[in-house]
Amino acid sequence: MKFTLLQTDPRSAARCGVLNTAHGAIPTPVFMPVGTRASVKSVEPHELKENNVHIILANTYHLYLKPGNDIILKAGGVHKFMNWDGPLLTDSGGYQVYSLSELRKISEEGVIFKSHLDGSMQQFTPENVVDTQRIIGSDIMMPLDECPPSMAEKEYIRKSGELTIRWAARAKKAFSSTSPLYGHDQYLFGITQGGIHNDLREVSIKALVDMDFDGYSIGGMAVGEPAPEMYRILELSHTLLPEQKPRYLMGVGTPENILNAIERGVDMFDCVIPTREGRNGRVYTRHGKMNLRSAKYATDFSPIDEGFDNDVCRNYSRAYIRHLLNVGEILGLKICTLQNISFFMWLTATARTHIQQGSFLEWKDDFLKRFNDNDKA
Amino acid sequence: MKFTLLQTDPRSAARCGVLNTAHGAIPTPVFMPVGTRASVKSVEPHELKENNVHIILANTYHLYLKPGNDIILKAGGVHKFMNWDGPLLTDSGGYQVYSLSELRKISEEGVIFKSHLDGSMQQFTPENVVDTQRIIGSDIMMPLDECPPSMAEKEYIRKSGELTIRWAARAKKAFSSTSPLYGHDQYLFGITQGGIHNDLREVSIKALVDMDFDGYSIGGMAVGEPAPEMYRILELSHTLLPEQKPRYLMGVGTPENILNAIERGVDMFDCVIPTREGRNGRVYTRHGKMNLRSAKYATDFSPIDEGFDNDVCRNYSRAYIRHLLNVGEILGLKICTLQNISFFMWLTATARTHIQQGSFLEWKDDFLKRFNDNDKA
């Protein structure tokens, strides 16, 4: 994996770099919109590009169930299937097996689970999850892990972490012994686990670093623990992870969590917040959140965020979007989704600029103060 | 109204022309996608332009109820409100009062109806419907009419037609005694009625032609009568309507109905078919309809219509769209909607080209044979 660390903030662990993939270079820190089922909900791929999206995320669990590996293989991979020619990262499905499947049995071999779609019994192993991601053709793949419940006993998390390490070794072996199917390089990250326990995190990180993955994700965070606990784990991870490899905090998050994680050395983020909240009419601006369903915007003909440089703010007023949401027009949720994606891309891009300029911490404090004071959602 | 009749087919009543409005010139024959509530469902205005849409339709009934005249007036009209700078036509709401409101009372004065949204009692008169369309700012407005049920007794249709004529006179007067609110010209069409009865149609058309409207719509068609009855009324209307004014067949229709109406001298069409069927995964191609929900497209990686010149066919495969529909992704119905709008614009544009080339009838027969033989929906 060609990750180039360009600059580090002298007063924090914040860093900026470039992550090169066969489908394009990704400036970091970066936010990755979620396109679980090979579609970032309601948005066309060319619109993602127009809104400065560098890389999107899809999910192995969902794609494996539908449309299934046969169709994806015949399509020539997910890039071609969905007409997205930018970088693509796939989550392994470990978290989804845990969160979506009503029935699962974890063993040394892997996990047997019941499809939430048709009730069929399916098996994921470290090996077949790599195989599926070979078929998907993602630029960055994740190994199968176990994501323990946030409230699990430490002993459970310890054992689960050890299993995830053994699975990671098997995933690495499967990755090394197979080749990309579509002529472009693919990379494999390791997923660190260990809950909120420093000692377990250390064991997990050291074991995975020894296996020399292309990058490292920090898993099992933002699953209910208080933010300070997450920040502590990020600080610990920063000291243990290799400086020259990208770090990805899975499933995070709010603007505040993202900026605080950037401060602690994280490079990559994904979260359903922009798309999910957009579908509910909640939009993100540089000055706080707004709920555009509110009647108070009925005659507010200003853009969502005056002067914000995107098509949504150039083209539509709060009053019009509020009308669309109010009468149930699909276009309303699509516009809100685009605004949010655009905002999250702006957020990480602007953080990057300030890291380069040495003004990250001041900007972050300034921005969060303004943003949190104006939460109108 | 500046309507220029450019050419008439020597072997049929088919004609092509240009209809000039303050928001642009419209080549006729033309299909107008429906944006009832100031949104062509799921599609952004710039996408309409990119798919060759010349004029869209919105509905006075719906806009009057939501967002309401106050908001539209403050927005500076619907063009600005929805960010559509092309021509806009508004239906008067007569048909919607008939089809959507559960309770209505028609009198000489107008119609009192119960809002289908909040149950409030509302009144439409010929005058206030013109006023509302002044507020909407539509380039072409329609007068309030009564649209009798298709199975109504002839005597009812006769009386209803007479009422519609008196309302038309009042609408014309209201139109003449008011001015556009936003500095651009607006036009008022007359709506001819009379069901499937030649004598009643003749009375209606002659009375409205005497009032000298900017154009004429043929109302009360495609409400359940057999197609040959509609065609007979179109042929009669053609002989009675002034050649130099545009003719608009409201609510029509299928490609077959549209082409047969063009053959009989109609210039303008609107219908929810492309948008409604698109949302259900039924798409129109030059070779027939297809239902993309069908499993038979699961591994069909060809475009919806190979070689069709639009973004949908350039960007997406049947298999991908089928996947999106299959898993309930909004993007699926948006892509199908765009395909259908694009197809209906192609249909009327191609009819126009063949009228200009003197090959309309041959092309129509050819096209319909191919299209109807391949109805895969």
Image: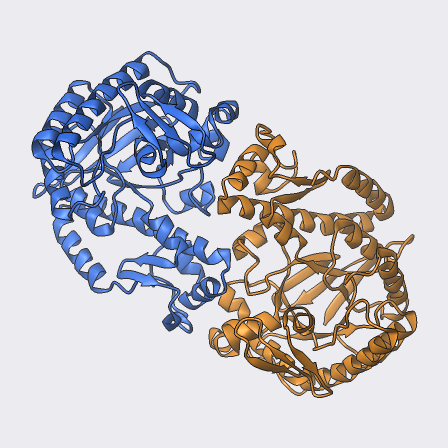
Chain colours: A orange, B blue
Query: Quick check: can you spot residue B185?
Result: no
How many callouts does the rendering have?
0
Relative side of B365 to A224, left or right:
left
Residue B322, located in which quarter of the rendered image?
Answer: bottom left
| Residue A117, position as x, y percentages in the image | 54, 71
| Residue A294, position as x, y percentages in the image | 62, 36
B29 vs A247: above or below: above
Q: As drawn, which residue projects farthest toward the top?
A: B177
Residue B307, located in which quarter of the rendered image?
Answer: bottom left
Quarter of the picture holding the N terminus of chain A? bottom right
Taking the spot 26% from the left edge, 26% from the top edge, the residue there is B189
Relative side of A10 to B7, left or right:
right
Relative side of A212 to A98, left or right:
right
| Residue A123, position as x, y percentages in the image | 62, 83
A187 vs B146: above or below: below
Taking the spot 23% from the left edge, 42% from the top edge, the residue there is B223
Quarter of the picture holding the C terminus of chain A? top right
Query: Quick check: can you spot residue B189?
Result: yes
Taking the spot 45% from the left edge, 35% from the top edge, the residue there is B84
Residue B376, located in which quarter of the rendered image?
Answer: bottom left
Relative side of B82 to B161, left or right:
right
User: Between B228 and B163, which is closer to the camera in this rendering?
Assistant: B163
